Amino acid sequence: MTKDLTHTVLIADKNILDKYELVIGLEVHAQLLTNSKVFSSDSIAFGKEPNTNISVVTLAHPGTLPKLNKKVVELAIKMGLACGCSISRYNIFDRKNYFYPDLPKGYQITQDKTPICKGGEVSVKTKDGKVRNIPLNRIHIEEDAGKSIHLDGENETLIDLNRAGTPLIEIVSEPDLRTSEEAAVYMTEVRRLVRYLEICDGNMEEGSMRCDANVSVRLKGEKQLGKKVEVKNMNSIRNVQRAIDHEFVRQITLIEQGKSIISETRTFDADTGLTHSMRAKEEMNDYRYFPEPDLAPFIVSEAFLESVKAQMPLLPAQLFDKFTQQYGLSDYDAGVLTDEKNIALYFEEVCSNTTNYKAASNWLMGAVKYHLNKLAIDISDFPLKPEKIVELIDLVDANKVSFSIASSKLFNEMMENPALTALQTAEKLNLLQESTDDAILPIIEAVLAKNPDKVIAYQKGNKNLLGMFMGEVMQMSKGKLDPKKTNELIRKALEKK
Ligand code: ADP
Ligand code: MG
């Protein structure tokens, strides 16, 4: 058993920490969004009464046999294609044997020697703009276990087997991540991919995406990998980063004290930000993997693979390229707009009906995002559909409403009453901008008549007064005049006098 360093002062000296390099490999489990379990027709619906989604197969009654859910294979392949993995055609499942009360069969069905996806990579872009492709070792299919529930003040452990047999993919990276920030960006990217592919909801807080972080340190320049520690139990990307940061300092402290790192599994405590030993390698199970005899090997046919390829949606990287190259958006705008699939699709819909892409981006990044945040809703629940944004863009481009009025009064009213068009709403609120001489000139005349001394000052050379006249005219018209035209007419009127 390892002794925790709870009573030891962790090294804080930057010069010492700087001598070392972090090495991280992540194992990410993602629950697949199928209707039924991976080897039975039991539902995987979340939040059901405990032990209701459990047929004899899930309960592992004698004589029952697993049967592979084809949808699981399809979703796993999608992730593999998104990461550029090679897809295995000949697949077998393996038994991973261990005893735990929430594992009714006494083994987990997984893929040991023949993962469905091999190789591939995930691209990570850190804050400093550096892009690195993190190689994957594999993505394989396996089943989830049930849940053990420990109620406060109770001695008994309760078991809920609803989750047992839920399909998972495990995405295993090579030990190629070098900072905790890279690990966080990697997790964010994996989450974005599974959400774009709609194969997993990516919610770490609810446990539908989970991460084990393998962490080691070594002196910079050293080629050999250090001994790794596996950290579990982080329920957010932020906590993955915190756990890694702590491990970095803890492991260096041990090494600097002349102690050695012990291969072990540790658990992260979100309250303290520390990790604690769960079990050392010697206490770990020998899983005695062997091929699952109850399932025939399954072959991924050319036709099946092609049909999955044909269903692949556009991925964030492809949309990013389209938004920057075809629509001329900045990297920053394209990054924000591709962050969430629904926002990207909404933006695409706006852009299929306007060529003013920059305006479309401004509307989304401004008024739309502001209201989404304020209402804390997803864009699919947003009251204004993409065609409303197109109407707003057209109205501003036609000089009928100024952008500032369109994005404030007009937008707010349309949110309340989305049935009317932007033009109808502007008419209703009397917001349409006047751009005819007949509408503008009388107001200019009135303002000039009110300020005879300023008119003389302007004519004597104080051209700065133009702004003052403009302000008064706009105020008198309640901001309804076309500003460019008005500015021009004021200048002409002053020069004529
Ligand atoms: P194990 O046999 O202990 O499960 P694996 O070789 O299967 O180890 O690797 C599991 C995960 O640990 C992978 O994500 C891998 O990249 C990572 N990993 C392996 N060795 C190290 C190391 N020395 N430091 C950090 N991560 C590592
Ligand atoms: Mg392993």
Image (cartoon, grey):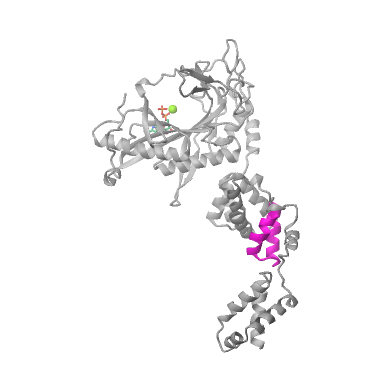
**249 relative position to 112: left or right:** left
Q: Position of residue 457 (x, y in %)?
A: 57, 87
Near-viewer residue (61 or 45) = 45
Q: Position of residue 113 (x, y in %)?
A: 48, 24
Judge whether 260 appears above or below 495 on screen: above
Res 260 visible = yes
Q: Position of residue 289 (x, y in %)?
A: 46, 19
Residue 404 included in the magenta stretch of the image: yes
Quarter occupied by the N terminus: top left
| Figure quadrant, ligand 1 | top left
For the view shown, which residue lies furthest in the left direction?
A: 258
Q: What stretch is highlighted in magenta?
A: 386-414
Residue 472 included in the magenta stretch of the image: no
- Image quarter for residue 422? bottom right
Question: Total number of numbered labels?
Answer: 0
Judge whether 259 appears above or below 54 on screen: below
Instruction: Please name the predominant secondary structure of the magenta segment in the image.
Output: helix
